[in-house]
Structures are given as structure tokens and as C-alpha cells.
Image (spheres, rainbow, N blue to C red):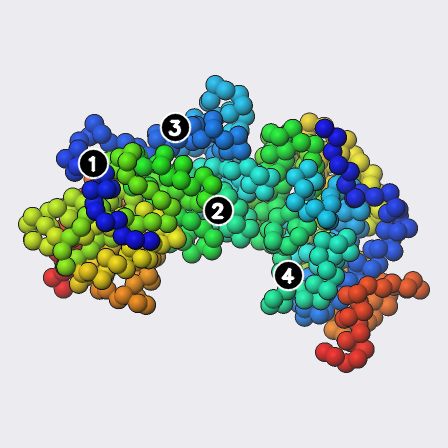
């Protein structure tokens, strides 16, 4: 039986389109977090290229049919980065963009961390370390069913200090889950400071290698390098892949870049305006979330 | 839910038959067989274990001759957190996973995973929680599950069923396979007296009157304590003229408040008997249910907030006064206050 085509990935999202989208998604993310008065900008901004490359160019999915069983799956193990994921899902039509303005609010759809009841969200996460096990479970089910769906899981680097990640890594390799790709957002920072100072992770590539993964390192802010890594992961058979995506926390906003202090802090009005100005540069970037939040800011609404 | 009108319709074994060691059964034996039967009938059923497949008897799936069944078994090694997460992932992809380990490890080592990966998204993961209580025996306090009810029933969406005896396990498996959301089945380890028969009713969410009594006392109980409580009730009736009611709270969550309250209204006092810490277990659940609308003075008969010690299962029930004579002694103590 021929499977029905998925609207994503779509060829129209070339690098120029993605580059523009990434600016908009960064702005949406910061507007949401400002509006919510809380949230995690640093780790959201470090994941923008990783997730936009995945959601527009790789993941087979269908916003009109979020429950399609033959869709690829994505588990955001670093659940606190959900603002960027919500921004993508809204842009792709999983739920009204209006919801972005109610992030973390009573009565709103979008919880502070991903919840399965949100259209487009494939797993509830947020307590760190749990995502790769979930991805493995989906992948095992896919193998049982003879499905070719691929399961992607994005982990934070600090998150790798959770023991369950390595339990899960053993399971991925033991069951030869070549339909699982773990992506590590290697931004080098966690709440208390540099990962290497808080609890050293290096040699990280060697760790994943010794756990039985095919390991690929890439520039996590380069669409072309991410594509090289994703292609290599999909082409690897007989073992799971781990992509170590080297990134910068807070990437795209100079005063947030590589600052652990921006892990979980909401930007002020002035900071939001400065960040949006910097992200947009001379480009005209628009979204309904930006319109609402920045409109309120200008009008002194908040 | 209405009270079962007669005890006869419970179709229980006589206490004489129940006491006959030839009739005793271990939950894990009937569990393994029931799981295999279910996996044979339902292709979406899968089983997972964390290196205890022989003890939990999930090995029945692993060792099935039919490869279409044995391929649905996954051992994740000694890693309970990954065990629960992997099970949750299988549920996300449409499977009905049976996740097996000792109760103390499932509830204690993977509580955070049960909470966020399973209960929050309300996934149909079934937990085979073997080795409940202290009748685990010689392995001792590190392996006793005496806080599992307390910490599991505090999780939203969780359904918590307590197997009365080995004979009831297949009934529970059948009744809960399609029950919405996560289900934890608490079972004992060793062969113990069997009270129920194939005709004894089991419905998820119901408590049953296993003994009708007079106006003095009700004994609420669950799991393997049902047998000892029924024995204790007979002794109290014969020697003390008290004639207690015995209610088997077969499902601890959702709690059958109607049955619990209806019986409470008929008596002056109650006791809760369980192989669990007196804090937070069935005792707490019954007290919470009654306090608001049908307050009843309650005594709590369980593990007195201690870790206990190694020993043979029957020795331990005697030592911690959870066998029939021990329950009688503690009920008398409570009533004399």
C-alpha cells in the first residue's frame, strides 16, 4: 500500500526560507517568554536551527493529522526548550498562533513544559533524562510493526548528567535501534554554569561511541552542516546515531549568547525590543505573536 | 455502585479450603500464565522487564515458543527508570505494555518516570508490581514494598488494583487490559492462601463485602491480608461475639467510596488491615473517604512505620502481627481503648 504523502518535509523550505523563518521563530520565542514572564530563552535559542531543519526539512509529519501513526516522532527531552518547539508547531498550523501569547497561563493550551495533549507534541517531558527511553519505546514498536518511521530525540548537554540517559543509550544500542537519532544540544552551559565545571561531560563523543552509537559532530547553527549530520544519521544502519550539535546558548542575541544567566529568565521590555531589533536586522519579520506582544509593549499595555 | 447484596454471590472458598496448603498459589505463577494468554489473544500486548523476568514470570512471554509472541518481550537490564520510560514509549506508539519488576523498585526507583512519562500523559501502561508487602521474606527490608500504595495512589490518573490472591490475578488482567490510563497491579511473592474462585466477581474500581456482620465493627482490607482478616473475623465472632464485617478493597484507586461508606454507616467502629505502612496506604485512603461525610473511628493495622527485618514470610506475618491471631490481638487492643 502506498502511503499518503506528508506535507512536511517540503522542498519550498530551502535555506533562504529557513534562515528567514529562524529569525521569526527566535522573535516568537522571546515574545512568548516575555509575555509569560518566565521560561527558558537560552536553551530555546540554541536549538532554533536544529529544530527548524528537522521540522521543515526532515521530519515526516502532518499538522492536519497530528495522530497519523506512520509519522516520524520527535521527543523534546530537554523539555524546557519548548517555546521554540511551540513556535514551530504554531507556524505549521498545529494550533492557533494566538496560543503562543498564553504560554504558561491558566486556561492556556501551552504548558511550561511539553504535554502530550498539545497537538503536535509527541511526548510529555520536562523532568530531565526521560526522553531517550520514550524514543526507544516508540522505535521498538515501529520495528515490531515493520514501520519505517524514524524517532528523533533532542537532549540538552547538562541533561546528560541524568543516569537514565545512559540506561537508555544502552537500550538503543542493545536493540540496534537505527531508527533512533539522539541529538545533543551542546551549548556548554547549564543553570549553575559551564557543564565542564559543574559536572564534566567530556570526552563526550567518546562516551556515546563507547555506548554503541554512531557519533556525528556538527555545527548546530548551520543548516547545511545539520543536514549533513541528519543525512548521515538516517543512512546509518544497524546502530543508533548520536549527533553532537555544537551550539551557543542564547544564539542570535548578543547579550544572551553564552550566558548561563539566560537559562531561565524572561527578558524585560527593553531587552525584548533590543533582542528583536538585533535578530531582525534589516529584514522585515512579522508574526501574529510578535504583533500582539510588541504591540502591547509599544502601547504600554503591560 | 451498590453493595453486593449477599456474601454468597462472592463465591468464595471456605476458610477451611483456603487454609489447605494444596490450594495455595503464588501470584507470579498465575500472572505469567495470564500474560501469555493475553499476549496470544492481543497482538498489541508487549512485556518488559529489568532482569527479573524469572521472578516476575514475564519470562513466559520471553520463552514463548511462538516467535510472534517472544519478539514482544524486551529486557532492558537492571535499569528501572529506562524500563518505565521504554514502556511509555511503546504505549505512545499504540502498544499495551506490561512493565514488570518488584514493587519496591517500580514504585521507588522509577516513581518520577511513572509520574511524568506515564501518568501525566495518561498512557495505558500496565505495571506488574510483584513482591508487594513484607511477605517478600528473606531478602529483607531493602526489598519490601510497604510504601508503594502511598506513593502510587498520590499520582493523578493512576489506577491501583490489589490482587487478593493468585487465583484472582487472571481476572484482574482480563478486566484491566482495556481500562483507560495507567494501571498498577500489586501482587504478593510467595504461595499464599487462596480465597477467591473463578466465579468471584472482580470489577475495576469496586470494593466487595466478603463478610456481613453486626453493628459493631468493619474490617477494611486488601490483597493477601484479606484471607487473614477473614480468619480474624471468625475468631472475633466466635470468641468475642463481635461479628465484624469484612470489606475487600480490591481496587485502592479509584476508591469505591459508596461501598466503604455504606458499610461504615452500619457500624460503630472500623479497622483497616494491610501489608503496608500504616501511613498513606489503604488506611489513609479509607480515612480520607470517610472523614468528610461518614466519619467513623478507625484503627490502623499494618506495618508500624518501620523497615522490618528478614525472615520467612509466615514468620514475618506473625512477628508483625498481620496473621489472623495478630490481627485479632490488635483489633482487641483497639476496641479496648
Q: CA distance from mark 1 to mark 4?
A: 53 Å
Q: Is residue A67 visible?
A: yes
Asked if marks 2 and 1 fall on the same chain, the answer is yes
Q: Secondary structure at mark 4?
A: loop
Image spot of residue A188 (x, y percent): 72, 53
The structure residue drawn at horizontal position 36% and vertical position 44%, both measured from the top left corner, is B203
Subunit under mark 3: B
Q: How many marks?
A: 4
- Of the residues under marks 3 and 1, which one precedes in the sequence? 1
The structure residue drawn at horizontal position 33% and vertical position 62%, both measured from the top left corner, is B288
| Label placed on residue B33 | 3
Picture quadrant where residue B313 is located? top left
Q: Are marks 4 and 3 in contact (CB under 8 Å)?
A: no
Image spot of residue A60 (x, y percent): 75, 41
Q: Is residue A210 left or right of residue B292?
A: right
Picture quadrant where residue A274 is located? bottom right
Where is mark 2, residue-wise? B180
Q: Residues within 10 Å of mark 2 (few under 14, many from 20)?
A: some
Q: Are marks 3 and 2 in contact (CB under 8 Å)?
A: no
Q: CA distance from mark 3 to mark 1?
A: 22 Å
| Label placed on residue A109 | 4
Amino acid at each position: 500500500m502506498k502511503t499518503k504523502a506528508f506535507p512536511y518535509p517540503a522542498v519550498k523550505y530551502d535555506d533562504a526560507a529557513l534562515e528567514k523563518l529562524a529569525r521569526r521563530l527566535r522573535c516568537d520565542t522571546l515574545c512568548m517568554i516575555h509575555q509569560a514572564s518566565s521560561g527558558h530563552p537560552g536553551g530555546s535559542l540554541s536549538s532554533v536551527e536544529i529544530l527548524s531543519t528537522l521540522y521543515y526539512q526532515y521530519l515526516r509529519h502532518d499538522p492536519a493529522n497530528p495522530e497519523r501513526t506512520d509519522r516520524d516522532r520527535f521527543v523534546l527531552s530537554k523539555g524546557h526548550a519548548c517555546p521554540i518547539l511551540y513556535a514551530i508547531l504554531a507556524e505549521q498550523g498545529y494550533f492557533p498562533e494566538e496560543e503562543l501569547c498564553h504560554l504558561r497561563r491558566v486556561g492556556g493550551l501551552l504548558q511550561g513544559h511539553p504535554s502530550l495533549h498539545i497537538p503536535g507534541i509527541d511526548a510529555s517531558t520536562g523532568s530531565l533524562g526521560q526522553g531517550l527511553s520514550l524514543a526507544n519505546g516508540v522505535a521498538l514498536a515501529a520495528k515490531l510493526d515493520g514501520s519505517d518511521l524514524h524517532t528523533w530525540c533532542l537532549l540538552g548537554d547538562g541533561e546528560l548528567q541524568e543516569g537514565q540517559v545512559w540506561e537508555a543509550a544502552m537500550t538503543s544500542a542493545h536493540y540496534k535501534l537505527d531508527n533512533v537519532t539522539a541529538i545533543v544540544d551542546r551549548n556548554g552551559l547549564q543553570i549553575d554554569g559551564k557543564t565542564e565545571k559543574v559536572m564534566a561531560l567530556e570526552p563526550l563523543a567518546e562516551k556515546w561511541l563507547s555506548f554503541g552509537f554512531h557519533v556525528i559532530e556538527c555545527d548546530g547553527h548551520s543548516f547545511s552542516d545539520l543536514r549533513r549530520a541528519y543525512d548521515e544519521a538516517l543512512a546509518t544502519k544497524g546502530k543508533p546515531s548520536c549527533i553532537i550539535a555544537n551550539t551557543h546558548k542564547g544564539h542570535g542575541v548578543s547579550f544572551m549568547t553564552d550566558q548561563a544567566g539566560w537559562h531561565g529568565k524572561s527578558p524585560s521590555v527593553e531587552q525584548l525590543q533590543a533582542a528583536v531589533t538585533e535578530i531582525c536586522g534589516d529584514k522585515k519579520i512579522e508574526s501574529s505573536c510578535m504583533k500582539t506582544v510588541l504591540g502591547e509593549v509599544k502601547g504600554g499595555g503591560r | 455502585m451498590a453493595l453486593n447484596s449477599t456474601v454468597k454471590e462472592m463465591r468464595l472458598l471456605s476458610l477451611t479450603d483456603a487454609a489447605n496448603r494444596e490450594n495455595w498459589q503464588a501470584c507470579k505463577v498465575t500472572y505469567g500464565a495470564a500474560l501469555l494468554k493475553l499476549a496470544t489473544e492481543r497482538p498489541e500486548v508487549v512485556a518488559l522487564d529489568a532482569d527479573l523476568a524469572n521472578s516476575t514470570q514475564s519470562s513466559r512471554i520471553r520463552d514463548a515458543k511462538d516467535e510472534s509472541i517472544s519478539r514482544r518481550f524486551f529486557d532492558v537490564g537492571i535499569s528501572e527508570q529506562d524500563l518505565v520510560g521504554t514502556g511509555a514509549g511503546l504505549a505512545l506508539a499504540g502498544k499495551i505494555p506490561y512493565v514488570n519488576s518488584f514493587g519496591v523498585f517500580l514504585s521507588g526507583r522509577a516513581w518520577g518516570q511513572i509520574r511524568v512519562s506515564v501518568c501525566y500523559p495518561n498512557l495505558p501502561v500496565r505495571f506488574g508490581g510483584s513482591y508487594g508487602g513484607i511477605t517478600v521474606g528473606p531478602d529483607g527490608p531493602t526489598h519490601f514494598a510497604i510504601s508503594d500504595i502511598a506513593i502510587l495512589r498520590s499520582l493523578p490518573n493512576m489506577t491501583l488494583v490489589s490482587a487478593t490472591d493468585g487465583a484472582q490475578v487472571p481476572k484482574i488482567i482480563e478486566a484491566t487490559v482495556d481500562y483507560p490510563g495507567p494501571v498498577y497491579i500489586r501482587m504478593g511473592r510467595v504461595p499464599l492462601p487462596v480465597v477467591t474462585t473463578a466465579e468471584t466477581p472482580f470489577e475495576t474500581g469496586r470494593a466487595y463485602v466478603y463478610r456481613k456482620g453486626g453493628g459493631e465493627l468493619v474490617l477494611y482490607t486488601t490483597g493477601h491480608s484479606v484471607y487473614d482478616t477473614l480468619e480474624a473475623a471468625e475468631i472475633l465472632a466466635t470468641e468475642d461475639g463481635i461479628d465484624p464485617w469484612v470489606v475487600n478493597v480490591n481496587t485502592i484507586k479509584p476508591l469505591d467510596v459508596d461501598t466503604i461508606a455504606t458499610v461504615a454507616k452500619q457500624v460503630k467502629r472500623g479497622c483497616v488491615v494491610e501489608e503496608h505502612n500504616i501511613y498513606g496506604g489503604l488506611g489513609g485512603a479509607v480515612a480520607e473517604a470517610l472523614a468528610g461525610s461518614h466519619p467513623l473511628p478507625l484503627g490502623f493495622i499494618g506495618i508500624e512505620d518501620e523497615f522490618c527485618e528478614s525472615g520467612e514470610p509466615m514468620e514475618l506475618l506473625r512477628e508483625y502481627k498481620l496473621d489472623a491471631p495478630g490481627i485479632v490481638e490488635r483489633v482487641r487492643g483497639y476496641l479496648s481503648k
